[in-house]
Amino acid sequence: MILFIPFPFLKNTIHKRQLMKITLFKIFFILFIIAVFTGCKKNTVINEKQALLFQVDYVNYAWGYQHNGFIIDNEGKVDNLEKCVFSGKIIPSGELIKYVRYIKNISSSKVTAQKNVAADAGSLEYICYQFSETSGTYKGSLIKMEGDFTCENLNFYSKKVWTWLRSINDSIIKK
């Protein structure tokens, strides 16, 4: 079938428009394919199955039993261990991710030998956790221990995490 165009000078214009539509379609299609395959990577360090990230735990058996502290979960909620309830404090996600990134380094580092420095002071431990999806278990790594005995993780980041956890502990105790 022959297409009749009443104005021959429009023949090139119609052809150019069709070519432009096809070219634009190809460009959008290629960009779509690139977007689908590269996508937006989820910028998170937290394993979605890992519920427990950090723990500060104080235990003392001298002059009666004392046990308190807190845990921080993957949503940034700080739960009080003494009362077994939510403390009302939530760590902002950006801040939480900053410190979660250090867990792998801390867990692969050595810890100093325990040194006896006091009596009846109890034990205050700062711990971070890694979750193994294959076994479904947590591995706790000591960041620092204070009290009757002291020891600390030798990793560069452990002091940063310890200072951060101590500030959270101080803010909870003041409430």
Image (cartoon, helix red, strand yellow):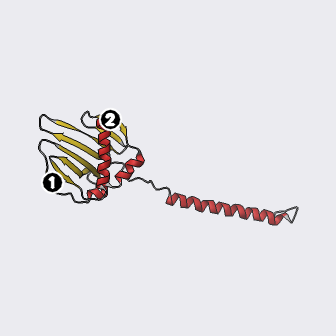
Q: Callout 1, which amino acid?
A: Gln
Residue at 27 percent across and 45 percent down: it is 55
Q: Secondary structure at mark 2?
A: strand
From the viewer's perspective, tell me whether residue 103 is left or right of residue 44: left
Q: Are marks 1 and 2 in contact (CB under 8 Å)?
A: no
For the residues marked 1 and 2, what is the alpha-carbon distance in whole angstroms? Answer: 32 Å
Which numbered disc covers residue 126? none
Q: Position of residue 105 (x, y in %)?
A: 30, 59
From the viewer's perspective, is the residue at label 1 or at label 2 nearer?
1
Q: Is residue 26 above or below residue 159?
A: below
Amino acid at circle 2: Phe
- Asked if residue 133 shows in the view, the reply is no
Query: How far across and how far down the image is residue 62, in percent?
Result: 12, 38
Expressed as whole percent of the image width and height from the top left, the position of residue 141 reads 24, 53
Looking at this view, name the residue that lies furthest to the right: 6
Q: Which image quadrant is residue 22 in?
A: bottom right
Toward which corner of the image does residue 155 lie, by quadrant?
bottom left
> Image quadrant for the N terminus?
bottom right
The residue nearer to you, when weighing 43 against 61, is: 61
| Mark 2 crowdedness (10 Å alpha carbons): few <14, some 14-19, many ≥20 | some
Residue 144 can be seen, yes or no: yes
Residue 102 in the image: above or below residue 72: below
Callout 1: helix, strand or loop? loop
60 shown above or below 36? above
Residue 171 % position (x, y): 32, 39
State the residue position of label 2: 86
Disc with the residue nearer the chain's start (1 vs 2): 2
Q: Is residue 6 left or right of residue 131?
A: right
Residue at the image position 28 percent from the left and 36 percent from the top: 173
At a point 18% along the width and 40% down the height, the residue shown is 59
In the picture of the structure, the residue carrying the numbered disc 1 is 114
